[in-house]
């Protein structure tokens, strides 16, 4: 019985050192994918112990430091400018809008003197397709991450990850092409089956398209495939960092492999997985050309069914791109782009906060 | 104590190793099956897609004309001509983007790793994450709003290059950053100890050590932007002839060729061009990916 | 329910690397046996083969026999998971499950076995924490996370977790190396108590600790880096530290090593 409260500190420090260690694993370097998503698990603290900092240095030092800082600022400025110019270009059109921007299902910009546009249906289609993609890709992505980190022998893990990475290498227009010309006809019977037997449920009710190919349902599946490598890459990385001692604690209690995952790997990697899923969601929300090719345009407003057609924010803008000539109609699309920008900003910021809190904490 | 702890399902005649219950074993097997299944489920669409593209696109790309001719003077339903003009456009636009994004991206990564302190560095790092999540259509709209609507430029391949800069930057920054962090501090300290100033240490010691990783990142960034379709839809018109000049006139690119043929040309020749274009695009993207992974294999930093 | 452990002609390999050579020793029930020796001599490696934890390292394998009361723990058809359930382990660094409460940590092993009866779990929780000399300190905050305890308390929590499933043998891999002297003393006292009910094998790099807690001591050594480790001798602790048979052992314990 000892009053040993003061050792907690020393212990936490040693724990942290080992938690970091696996990130040096050579296997996590040079992966084909997810390099951009890496950021969620790297911290912002400079690595070098920094003797050069105290000396202000000569002209060369000042110029070089200025150049690098300036380049960093370019990124900050880019985001600020994107927001600023989208707002500047959107406001006049929003003021000239004769429909309610938030609640109207219309998007009519043919008459510049009578703009009627709203984002209700864009929001519905964007969210339905992206969330469906997420619902499909999250469990599969987690399964693959577990498969690659907990089940595959290290020698095979690398080539297997490379295979998943290949999915990220396929350009989205090719996904769109394949989605509408190959996948859509192939899964039509399945869609028909769902509609016949689950049609009473609003998601599977008949939609506003006369056919069952090229629906939000098809788009959601294509998007799920597209975001799978994103979710997998980041989740895999976090799972692989599960501290060895936590895994051993479960093993020594006589836990089966699955029980080790439940007791050690999942609790440790949960936030990383959520962050990864948010990154995937962000990608799905903004995906343009694949959605434009796969989901058919509909003539009537959205019914909230997965068998609807219609436009997402991104696909609507792309579909109208060739008609960007008059400022006011163009501004209507830019205001849709602004909403998309805000949406992806928020989702990515959440991803960053969730991941940062866990892995750096 | 041991009496109080009597474990419930211990058999009367104890086998030395109390067996794991069947239910737990089944759960464990089930998990193994499901997890392996998840991997298979991901492989199915990949193989399906690659095989479809290969089968449908292969007849197009085997002709020599495909790689050396444009579609200038070819009618939509003629199986003739090639995609040289689109390959040129794709590469020209990617190079424009690279010329700007690579130096800025590397310098920004140097800032984050070597100089960045405090709030500005945190903000920059955060914004790199945000930028990597900006949809390509939004990047394209921004360039349109700024350069076409406000400055009044004509749509051109150059503007596509500018939009691609925004998509390339975060990839270059994150990859370079990661490599710079792997450069051991001992190297920096050895250089400082010789009286070499920090900026020269970075330029002469740190960056060269991280070079192969940085090049890998640049290759991956190229692979990412060459497949982008949204910027070319918004920022440049399609041309059926070769145009080397990104500052003037329409300029084709592989994604734009695919999209244009798909939306305007239902003939068999059009179908062939679509799939041939898709296969060509995949091949070029994979070439860059392959280069990236080969270079990273010969990484200078060995752990 | 303590049982005896017998190692017969045990050789351990990591891939092509011969890590430990030809170990023969016996651990009687209700006793403490400590493994001492220089770094890299394979003492921890041997310990980890006793509950098949080494199998988690790819390429690791064991030749020879390890018997628990005469039954080979590597017998065909025996399951590593079942072995670990019978032979508990405490690690160098305290490793409570960070997301679980103190109570859930203690009963984690029982829950794995499907025990759901709340009353039973609470009983076992209290008995195990008492057994680990931790009950008085944590009884008021059983629902708090285990990670909030001090290092020494965490290690005793891990011991409570290990004894909650009533193992036949308790393996301890340098259990005090991450702790301060006062916590170390608490753990050593606890080992003395636990010996009444369990067979205990402890790896330590602290010779005074081996002398204090163990009934018999095994000294491992290796000829050179890269060569396999081997058991030099095993004997009553008193004899090892006062009058060892082997010259090597004497050199080591008197600090003339190397």
Image: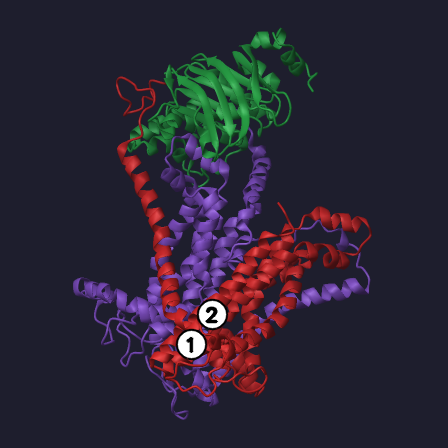
Label drawn at residue B258: 1
Between C79 and C113, the residue placed more toward the observer is: C79
**In this view, B187 is above or below B155:** above
- Residue B212 in the image: state x and y as whole percent: 63, 57
Q: Is residue A34 left or right of residue A112?
A: right
The letter of the green chain is C
- The shade of chain B is red
Q: Residue at x 61, y 18 (%)?
A: C207
Asked whether residue C133 appears in the rendered view, the answer is: no
What secondary structure is found at the residue carrying circle 2? Answer: helix
- Residue C134 in the image: state x and y as whole percent: 46, 26
Q: Is residue C114 left or right of residue C196?
A: left
State yes or no: discs 2 and 1 in contact (Cβ < 8 Å): yes
Q: How is the image coloured?
A: by chain
Task: Identify the residue position indicated by label 2 in the image.
Answer: B281
The letter of the purple chain is A
**In this view, C123 is above or below C8:** below
- Residue A339 in the image: state x and y as whole percent: 44, 74
Q: Is residue C224 left or right of residue C2?
A: right
Q: Is residue C57 left or right of residue A295?
A: right
Q: Residue at x 59, y 56 (%)?
A: B295
Crowd tier of the residue under label 2, counting other residues whose Cα lies within 10 Å: few below 14, some 14–19, many 20 or above: many
Rendered-image quadrant of the N terminus of chain B: top left
């Amino acid at each position: 019985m000892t009053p040993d409260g003061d050792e907690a500190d020393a212990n936490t420090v040693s724990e942290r050192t080992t938690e970091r260690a696996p990130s040096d694993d050579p296997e996590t370097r040079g992966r084909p994918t997810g390099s951009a998503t890496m950021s969620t698990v790297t911290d912002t603290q400079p690595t070098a112990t920094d003797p050069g900092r105290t000396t202000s240095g000569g002209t060369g030092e000042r110029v070089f430091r200025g150049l690098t800082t300036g380049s960093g600022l370019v990124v900050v400025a880019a985001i600020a400018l994107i927001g600023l110019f989208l707002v500047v270009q959107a406001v006049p059109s929003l003021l000239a809008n004769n429909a309610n921007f938030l609640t109207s299902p219309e998007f009519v910009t043919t008459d510049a003197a009578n703009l009627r546009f709203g984002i209700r249906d864009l929001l519905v289609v964007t969210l339905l397709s992206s969330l469906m993609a997420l619902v499909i890709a999250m469990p599969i992505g987690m399964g693959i991450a577990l498969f690659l980190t907990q089940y595959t022998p290290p020698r095979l893990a690398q080539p297997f990850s490379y295979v998943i990475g290949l999915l990220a290498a396929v350009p989205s227009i090719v996904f769109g092409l394949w989605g509408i010309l190959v996948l859509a006809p192939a899964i039509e019977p399945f869609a028909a089956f769902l509609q016949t037997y689950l049609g009473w449920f609003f998601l599977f009710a008949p939609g506003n398209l006369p056919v069952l190919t090229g629906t939000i349902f098809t788009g959601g599946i294509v998007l799920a495939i597209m975001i799978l490598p994103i979710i997998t890459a980041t989740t895999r990385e976090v799972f692989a960092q599960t501290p060895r001692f936590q895994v051993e604690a479960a093993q020594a209690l006589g836990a089966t492999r699955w029980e080790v995952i439940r007791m050690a790997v999942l609790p440790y990697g949960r936030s990383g997985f959520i962050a990864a899923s948010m990154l995937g969601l962000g990608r799905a929300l903004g995906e343009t050309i694949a959605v434009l090719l796969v989901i058919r345009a509909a003539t009537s407003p959205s019914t909230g069914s997965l068998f609807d057609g219609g436009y997402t924010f991104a696909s609507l803008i792309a579909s109208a791109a060739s008609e960007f000539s008059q400022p006011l109609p163009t501004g209507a699309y830019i205001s849709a782009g602004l909403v998309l920008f805000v949406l992806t900003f928020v989702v990515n910021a959440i991803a960053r906060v969730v991941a940062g809190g866990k892995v750096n904490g | 104590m041991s009496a109080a702890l009597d474990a419930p399902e211990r058999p009367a005649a104890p086998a030395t190793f109390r067996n794991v219950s069947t239910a737990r074993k089944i759960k464990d097997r089930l998990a193994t099956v499901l997890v392996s299944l998840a991997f298979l489920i991901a492989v199915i669409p990949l193989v399906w897609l690659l095989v479809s593209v290969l089968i449908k696109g292969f007849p197009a790309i085997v002709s020599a004309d495909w790689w050396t001719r444009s579609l200038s003077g070819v009618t939509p339903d003629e199986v003739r001509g090639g995609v040289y003009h689109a390959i040129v456009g794709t590469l020209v636009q990617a190079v424009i983007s690279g010329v700007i994004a690579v130096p800025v991206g590397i310098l920004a990564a140097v800032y984050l790793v070597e100089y960045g302190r405090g709030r500005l560095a945190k903000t920059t790092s955060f914004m790199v994450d945000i930028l990597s999540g900006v949809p390509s259509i939004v990047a394209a709209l921004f360039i349109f709003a700024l350069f076409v609507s406000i400055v009044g430029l004509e749509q051109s391949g150059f503007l596509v290059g500018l939009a691609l800069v925004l998509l390339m930057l975060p990839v270059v920054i994150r990859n370079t950053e990661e490599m710079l962090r792997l450069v051991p501090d001992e190297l920096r300290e050895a250089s400082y100890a010789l009286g070499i100033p920090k900026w020269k240490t970075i330029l002469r010691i740190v960056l060269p050590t991280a070079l192969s990783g940085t090049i890998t990142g640049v290759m991956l960034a190229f692979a990412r932007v060459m497949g982008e379709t949204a910027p070319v839809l918004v920022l440049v018109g399609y041309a059926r002839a070769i145009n080397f000049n990104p500052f003037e006139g329409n300029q084709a690119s592989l994604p734009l060729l695919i999209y244009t043929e798909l939306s305007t040309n239902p003939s068999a020749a059009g179908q062939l061009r679509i799939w041939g274009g898709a296969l060509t695009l995949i091949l070029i993207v994979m070439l860059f990916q392959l280069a990236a992974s080969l270079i990273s294999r010969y990484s200078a930093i060995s752990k | 329910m303590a049982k005896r452990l017998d190692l017969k002609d045990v050789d351990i390999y990591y891939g092509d690397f011969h890590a430990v050579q030809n170990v023969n020793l016996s651990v009687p029930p209700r006793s403490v046996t400590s493994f001492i020796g220089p770094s890299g001599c394979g003492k921890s490696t041997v310990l980890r083969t006793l509950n098949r934890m080494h199998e988690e390292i790819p390429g690791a394998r064991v030749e020879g026999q390890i018997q628990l009361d005469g039954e080979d723990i590597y017998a065909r058809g025996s399951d590593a998971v079942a072995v670990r359930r019978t032979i508990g382990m405490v690690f160098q660094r305290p490793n409570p499950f960070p997301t679980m409460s103190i109570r859930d940590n203690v009963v984690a092993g029982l829950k794995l076995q499907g025990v759901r009866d709340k009353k039973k779990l609470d009983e076992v929780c209290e008995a195990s924490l008492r057994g680990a000399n931790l009950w008085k300190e944590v009884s008021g905050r059983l629902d708090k996370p285990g990670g909030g305890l001090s290092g020494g308390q965490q290690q005793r929590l891990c011991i409570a977790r290990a004894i909650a499933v009533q193992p036949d043998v308790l393996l301890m891999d340098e259990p005090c190396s991450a702790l301060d002297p006062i916590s170390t003393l608490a753990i050593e006292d606890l080992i003395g108590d636990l010996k009444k009910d369990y067979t205990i094998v402890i790896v330590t790099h602290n010779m005074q600790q081996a002398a204090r807690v163990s009934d018999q001591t095994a000294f491992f050594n290796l000829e050179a880096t890269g060569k396999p480790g081997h058991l030099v001798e095993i004997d009553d602790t008193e004899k090892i530290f006062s009058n060892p048979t082997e010259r090597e052992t004497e050199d080591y314990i008197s600090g003339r090593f190397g």
